[in-house]
């Protein structure tokens, strides 16, 4: 019997075993080199093999792992929520029971040293080839896992940073937002909803809804600023301030954003922050008012000087006019001119001291500067020469008259403070260089000048070199000029003085003003006038004026006396001419009571200054003091004839 076939089969089996062993050796080499942990579980769940990565991740040696199962009491595992991870729910045990793989199961494992390691586990069923050949289903499981501790820690750090950022945004009254140009969708963080004062999740993400929340007076300006920034291919930054109306009332917001563009330069997205700057705006207004009051203090001496001159002229001319045998015409003319000069001083002071801005309008910047000449002279005093040079205009700008006036006054005050003894300050208005459609107001002094280091900080809030100053003057001026679409530049050197230039865009919407027509002479009247005035001299002169005009007069010293005078005779009165501020009962309450009896009653208010007058007075006709007989007669006639 030949044994050759058996020998050949034996050699074939030996070669196959060698090949399998070589393959197994290579697999072991690959598994050993893997960064992922690999363990093999027998059918009973016991670990029968592991690689070096598994031992490193779990903190156990191969001998310590061998034979262990997830049911071992020493096995301490937790879920991501911190609860215990039962051993029978280990992915390997689940795969052994079901024959199905498990994917990306997160588990926290306590190492022998107490450290917690987080792993992501995958388990896969594997059948033994030899057993499969005999039809026996004897499953094994290969579990692979990755150490995700660092990844989870990074996520926790990121989550913590996000929470801290959210808290910081809330504390700073600031929120993050994003605007998608193509879809016109706005994405708000919860902080932005808090800034706008709307309930969390109530904002629908519509750009139109956002626009509707903006104050009507700021809406078109804000929309135009957004459109201009998106359309400018070189513009990467966006900035705007506007008011909003919401459950918290009117608030001021400041928005800053970065514009993202595609390869062709078209804007695709804006991302930025919205900051509630309401309190800052209030403080800014308070600082401006403080600066205005400080300047009024400086003006007081100069105003008193000029006003006393006017009074001296009045008293002297009146004394000369009263001398016997003199023709008083010349003295009376002098009195009238002195009164007009005093009235101009009063109007300038009241205009400068007003609390509320006039609002944006178009006016001639050269005329504003020229009109400030007397106030600037008083601010600088006699030791400093003031030179005002206004180039031939016109120089129409669109701005807030009051804010721009305050900027110029602040800059002139700074220029004067830079001069220790005597010196010169020049204020000039001229066209911007280079053909730009703009106008430049320059304020130049020959004072001490500034160092390079000081120049780098002059526009920073609260930076000052003065002992008693807020440090907000130049910062406020910079912000005001920037909001008006202009810029402010400053040049200075130690010992060479300082030059500040305010550049503003010209506005060509200026309406030409015709020369005023001569004032018409008021025709005489015969109607009954109720005259109410608490100042005896003014009351007597007004009575004389109106009597000479032919009117019938009822005269009272205050509102209560006026009610007594017209009791039962109100239907005879054609018009009430009353002062606003009077003892016992003022002009506004008097008008209210009289019109309750006769709604169609015509009225004319007269006042030199009424800081606390009722707001309804804004709808009533007024005549400012001082007035002349002619202006009083014209004002009354205008109301009677059609006012």
Image (cartoon, rainbow, N blue to C red):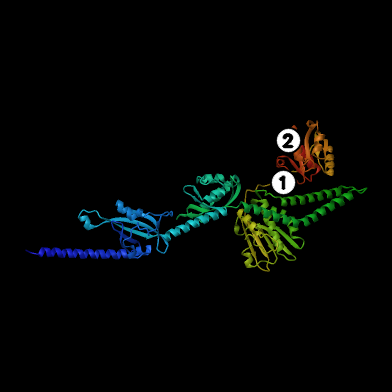
| Of the pair 62 and 589, the residue shown nearer to us | 62
Residue 308 placement: quadrant: bottom right
Of helix, strand and loop, which one carries label 1? loop
Q: How many numbered discs sit on the rendered protein?
A: 2
Q: On the image, numbered disc 1 is attached to which residue?
A: 515
123 with respect to 130 (left or right): right
Q: Is residue 393 visible?
A: no
Viewport quadrant of the C terminus: top right
Of badges 2 and 1, the one in the foreground is 2
Q: Earlier in the sequence, mark 2 or mark 1?
A: 1
Q: Position of residue 267 (x, y in %)?
A: 48, 52
Q: Which mark is residue 642?
A: 2
Against 543, is 463 above or below? below
Query: Disc number at residue 378?
Result: none
Image-based side of 462 in relation to 164, left or right: right
Q: Residue furthest right?
A: 324
């Amino acid at each position: 019997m030949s044994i050759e076939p058996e020998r050949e089969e034996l050699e074939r089996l030996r070669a196959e075993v060698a090949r399998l062993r070589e393959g197994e050796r290579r697999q072991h080499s690959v598994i050993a080199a893997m960064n992922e942990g690999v363990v093999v579980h027998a059918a009973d769940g016991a670990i029968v093999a592991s690689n070096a990565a598994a031992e490193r991740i779990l903190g156990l040696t191969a001998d310590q792992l061998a034979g262990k199962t997830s049911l071992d009491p020493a096995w301490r595992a937790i879920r991501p929520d911190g609860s215990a991870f039962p051993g029978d729910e280990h992915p390997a045990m689940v795969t052994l029971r079901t024959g199905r793989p498990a994917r990306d199961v997160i588990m926290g494992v306590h190492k022998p040293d107490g450290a917690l390691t987080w792993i992501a586990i995958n388990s896969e069923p594997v059948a033994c080839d030899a057993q499969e050949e005999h039809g026996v289903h004897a499953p094994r499981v290969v579990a692979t896992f990755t150490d995700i501790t660092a990844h989870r820690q990074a996520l926790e750090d990121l989550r913590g940073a996000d929470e801290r950022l959210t808290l910081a945004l809330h504390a700073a009254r600031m929120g993050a937002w994003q605007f998608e140009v193509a879809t016109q969708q706005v994405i708000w963080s919860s902080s932005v909803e808090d800034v706008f004062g709307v309930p969390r999740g109530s904002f629908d993400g519509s750009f139109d809804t956002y626009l509707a929340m903006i104050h009507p007076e700021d809406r078109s300006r804000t929309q135009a600023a957004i459109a201009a920034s998106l359309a400018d291919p070189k513009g990467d930054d966006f900035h705007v301030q506007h008011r909003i109306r919401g459950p918290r009332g009117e608030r001021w917001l400041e928005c800053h954003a970065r514009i993202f563009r595609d390869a062709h330069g078209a804007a695709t997205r804006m991302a930025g922050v919205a900051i509630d700057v309401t309190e800052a705006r209030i403080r800014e207004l308070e600082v401006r008012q403080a600066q205005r009051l400080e300047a009024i203090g400086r003006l007081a001496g100069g105003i008193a000087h000029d006003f006393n001159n006017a009074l001296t002229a009045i008293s002297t001319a009146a004394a000369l006019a009263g001398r016997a045998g003199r023709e008083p015409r010349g003295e009376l003319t002098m009195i009238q001119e002195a009164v007009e000069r005093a009235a101009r001083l009063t109007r300038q002071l009241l205009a400068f001291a007003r609390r509320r801005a006039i609002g944006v309008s178009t006016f001639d910047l050269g005329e504003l500067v020229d009109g400030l000449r007397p106030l600037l002279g008083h601010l600088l005093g006699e030791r400093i020469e003031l030179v005002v040079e206004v180039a031939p205009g016109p120089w129409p700008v669109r701005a807030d008259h009051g804010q721009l006036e305050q900027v110029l006054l602040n800059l002139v005050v700074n220029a004067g403070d830079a001069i220790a003894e005597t010196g010169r300050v020049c204020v000039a208005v001229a066209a911007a260089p280079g053909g730009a459609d703009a106008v430049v107001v320059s304020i130049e002094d020959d004072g001490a000048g500034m160092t390079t280091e000081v120049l780098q900080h002059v526009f920073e809030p609260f930076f000052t070199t003065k002992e008693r100053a807020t440090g907000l003057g130049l910062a406020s001026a910079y912000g005001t000029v920037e909001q008006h679409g202009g810029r402010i530049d400053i040049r200075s050197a130690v010992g060479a003085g300082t030059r500040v230039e305010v550049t503003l865009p010209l506005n060509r919407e200026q309406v030409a003003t015709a020369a005023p027509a001569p004032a018409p002479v008021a025709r005489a009247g015969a109607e009954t006038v109720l005259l109410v005035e608490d100042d005896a001299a003014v009351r007597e002169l007004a009575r004389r004026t109106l009597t000479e005009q032919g009117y019938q007069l009822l005269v009272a010293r205050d509102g209560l006396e006026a009610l007594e005078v017209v009791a039962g005779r109100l239907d005879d009165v054609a018009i009430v001419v009353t002062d606003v501020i009077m003892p016992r009962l003022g002009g506004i309450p008097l008008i209210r009571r009289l019109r309750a009896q006769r709604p169609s009653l015509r009225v004319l208010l007269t006042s030199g200054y009424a800081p606390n007058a009722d707001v309804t007075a804004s709808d009533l006709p007024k005549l400012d003091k001082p007035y002349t007989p002619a202006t009083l007669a014209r004002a009354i006639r205008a109301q009677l004839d059609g006012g």
